[in-house]
Amino acid sequence: MTRTRVVTVLAFLAIYVIWGSTYLAIRIAVETVPPLCAAGLRFLLAGSVLYGWARARGGPSPSRLEWRNILMLSTFLFLISYGGVFWAEKTIPSGIVSVLVAIIPLWTAVLQIFVLKKESLRWPLLASICCGIIGVAVLTFAPGSHLQPIACLAVLASGISWAVGTVLSKVLAVPKAMLVNSGAQMLLGGVLLLGFSALLGEWSPLPRISLSAGFAIVYLAVAGSIVAFTAYLWLLSRMKATVVTSYAYLNPVVALLVGHWLGNEALGLRTALGAVLVVFSVIVVIRSGARARE
């Protein structure tokens, strides 16, 4: 096996396994650290490393306009999106959160079709969106469900916010250097999260970071945000996006299994059915979007 092939396999393992495992790490982090504070520490650390590394390698500093746009994107992609996910994991299992997050491609498709008018509405796409919505309903509102509907809705809102940020990132002026752009967004996202954490009183008294929570936050920053994200960019530069974005429907599977095996989270028939419906709909949406661009 050639060196490039080995690196490719390791990169895919990073975006499949590491990103899938981050949901359990988030649950561990928020057990003792307030959610916005934990998210802020993760992205402040990761953003500082990525942005500093990119600038040290000669990446250009963003312009004033680009910083303004980065701030807007950081609000949608990190403050609202990750803030909601970290907050929700205080009350609902990490595996369920991963499945609810997985429908982000559906929200993106809806925005592209009905708001930006950049895609046409095709029956397979409409059917897949409906399938995903049914899957979410099975997970969240099924009779006998012990999930917190408000927390589930917060995750769905986080997904919508991420979809809005993703769509805006395609039309706003941002640095062309990918690591500069991503590092700056994470850095500002971390600052925003910590700022709102302080405003909401999470620092009074000062958060007590247990050993397990501290390890989880470092794992999220280093493995989840730096290693896996760098692997994701490397893969995107070398193969079709449709192959790389397969993480979107494999992460929930990994997260459910990791949460069940390592986090003692229940994995019943209802959860499996809802997950299958959501993952199937995401596969159809991603592949449909790929065919539309060909």
Image: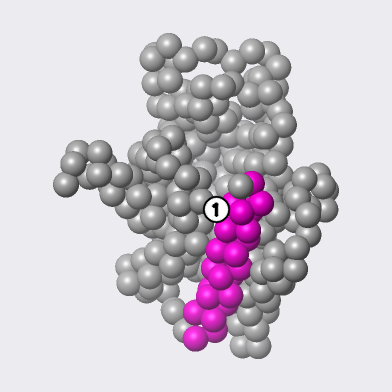
Kindly tell me whether residue 88 is visible in this rendering: no
Q: Which amino acid does label 1 sit on?
A: Phe
Q: Does the magenta stretch include residue 278?
A: yes
Question: In front here: 207 or 47?
Answer: 47
- The residue shown at (55%, 26%) is 181
What is the quadrant of residue 257 in the picture?
bottom left
Residue 152 appears anywhere in the view: yes
Q: Position of residue 106 (x, y in %)?
A: 67, 59
188 vs 95: above or below: above
Q: In which quarter of the image is residue 197?
A: top right
Outermost residue to the left: 1
Write the residue at 66% across / 51% down.
292
Q: Identify the residue shown where x is 51% and y is 51%.
A: 242
Q: Decide whether the magenta segment is chiefly helix, strand or loop.
A: helix
Name above or below for residue 289 compared with residue 194.
below
Q: Nearer the viewer, residue 195 or 79?
A: 79
Q: Name the residue under label 1.
A: 86
The segment highlighted magenta reads 269-293
- Looking at the picture, how far across and down is residue 47, in whole percent? 47, 30
For label 1, the crowd category at 10 Å Cα-Cα, with few meaning under 14, some 14 to 19 and many 20 or more, is: many
